[in-house]
Amino acid sequence: MADQGVFMLQLVITGVAVGGVYSLMALGFVLIFKASSVVNFGPGELVLFGAYVSWATILPMQLPLYVALPLTFGIAILLGLVIERGVLRPLIGEPIISVIMVTFGVASVIRGFLNMTWGSDTRPFPVLFSPEPFHLGPVPVSPVHLWSFVGVLVLLAAFSLFFKFSLTGMAMRATADNQQVAQSLGVSVKRVFALSWCIATVVSTLGGIILGSVRGGVDFSLADLGLKVFPVVILGGLDSVAGAIIGGVLIGVLENLSGGYLDPVLGGGVKEVAPFVVLVIILMLRPYGLFGKVEIERV
Amino acid sequence: MQSGGFRTSYRADERIFDTVVPIVGVVALIVALAVTPRFATTYWLDVLNRIGIAIIGALGLNILVGYTGQISIGHAAFLAVGAYSTAILEANAGLPFYLALPLAAVITSGFGLVFGIPSLRLRGLYLAIATLAAHFITTYGIVHWESLTKGVLGMMVPPATVFGLPLDSDARVFYLIFALVVPATFFAKNLFRTRVGRAFIAIRDRDVAAGVMGVSLYHYKLLAFVLSSFYAGLAGGLMAHHSRILFPDAFTLLVAIDYLAMIIIGGLGSILGAIFGAVFMTLLPEVLKLGATSLTGVYPNAFGVIASTRDIVFGLAVILFLMYEPQGLARIWLRVRGYWKLWPYAY
């Protein structure tokens, strides 16, 4: 019986750790959606980009961490600016199918670019934390999981404070609330759009670094994780920052529990599909999620 | 001589062919297709076969996305259901091919009906996400229902026989595929001259207004899903007979994105666009491959680099078309045609 409990705790802890990364990706997604109503269908590629660039700066270029990480984030910000200025700004006001497809196009370009530059082999990710697990009560926890979770918590707290108190954060919230009113009060909506993309690429990059060190290597399968962002944001509510954070952890735990308990019954891979089953159920029952804004529109 | 689009009756306005020239063109195209297998190499026949399959699939997706405005990222799942039902009906149930293929298309339609239920409640972005989820659930089912689909091991498909003639070469499959492409195209073209097609377009333009005008959204949205998945089922069944072995890997999300790209690049809400897009998207990797092989003499590693440029070129094509020609190749075609129609007195 005690074994059962440990097994479950283990699953929950791993789930929370992975969920933290989902929260980061979802945060980026929600920011973009809130500010500019653009749905980014390539969140995985942003994560992939971050993971590869940080790998490239740390290992092949041999830069010390305090240079490599800021450089990575700088490149990520640049990527965000390029995407927003170059691709999405000309498409403001276009039908939603165009916006969806253009984000697929951007994702494809990023994937091709990474493939061309660094090839598709798995790259060993630098070991940032000691691999020795320590014990939290009876449950062994690897430091990577713990530190990634702590990192995510700190970051999310920082973002909450940023949105609550800083002028830029308030401008972003105002834009999300009502673009026209924000503009008439002197908020540069264009700057907010660009900023939201930059923040999204930065948090995705961070997610990429964390995922890279959790898995010990980067390869293109990281991008597949990016699509898990959809169950997260639908569960939390498409336009809710708090929802993204809580939804990320919930989905992380849920996929681990369902994987751990249902895989022996259903024969593997439940982890990959369970979040999407939840997604469909929520869409049918409560499309605006746990914390999203309720928009009633009857067809 | 005709000048511009001057029409005096609804009959004239609804006509598929304005003048004799396009009729001659279409007939010439069909004749050309009929004699192609005599001249084409196996490689180009294979490419043509894939183009034919892509045309049917893209027509189906355009009915749903381009004409009815219901965004679906689940087209690969439809194709998979069509392909696997054909294979299972033939290999396990022993049905002859000419029964299995239509039956598989009907099964896929039923599947599309279920897929379409969320569209009654959701629209736009939410529908896109719902179909994305449905895609993952479907492919999970295909990978893990091993007793039926053999999972990741792959499923062999016996060659189809028509009147005792086994369709085991690319040339014979070519006739099968294009014998379906031609009627599928004409059906789709005609669909939008009927009440049903007009209802689809009305729903796309504004669903509430369409509902007020007496278009039953419940019926027509589901009908769009059914028709679209019927086409996808046909395309999937042909895929099964073209490749003769099925893997779940052939139906990833990237396939669904490819099909969406076809109708975007070709032209949303245009039959001609679906055809152009299918041709474009199938030829793109082939052209890149040809370029790579011709460059390997100069740069030894050109093949590796150019193979990975496929993603970049694909992405750029989608982005540039959306930015500069959102109505796609079909619009470019119309402009070019319009220019020559009035040339040299274009005033």
Image (cartoon, rainbow, N blue to C red):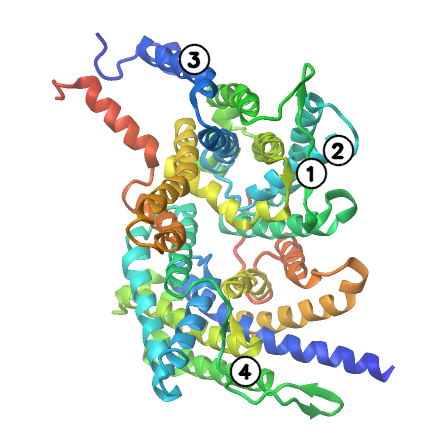
Secondary structure under tag 1 reads strand
**Whole-number angstrom distance, CA of label 1 to CA of label 3:** 33 Å
Tag 1 residue: B156
**Whole-number angstrom distance, CA of label 2 to CA of label 3:** 34 Å
Q: From the top left corner, tell me how far across and down residue A166 is, in percent.
A: 35, 82
Q: From the top left corner, tell me how far across and down residue B283 is, in percent.
A: 40, 37
Tag 3 residue: B31
Let me know if marks 1 and 2 both belong to one chain: yes
Q: Are marks 2 and 3 in contact (CB under 8 Å)?
A: no
**Whole-number angstrom distance, CA of label 4 to CA of label 2:** 50 Å
Name the residue located 49 percent from the left edge and 77 percent from the top edge: A125
Q: Amino acid at mark 4?
A: Ser
Which mark's residue is nearer the viewer, 4 or 3? 3
* Chain letter, disc 4 residue: A
Q: Are marks 1 and 2 in contact (CB under 8 Å)?
A: yes
Let me know if marks 4 and 3 both belong to one chain: no
Ranked by sequence position, the earlier of labels 1 and 2 is: 2
Q: Amino acid at mark 2?
A: Ala
Q: From the top left corner, tell me how far across and down residue B34 is, in percent.
A: 47, 15
Tag 4 residue: A148
Secondary structure under tag 3 reads helix
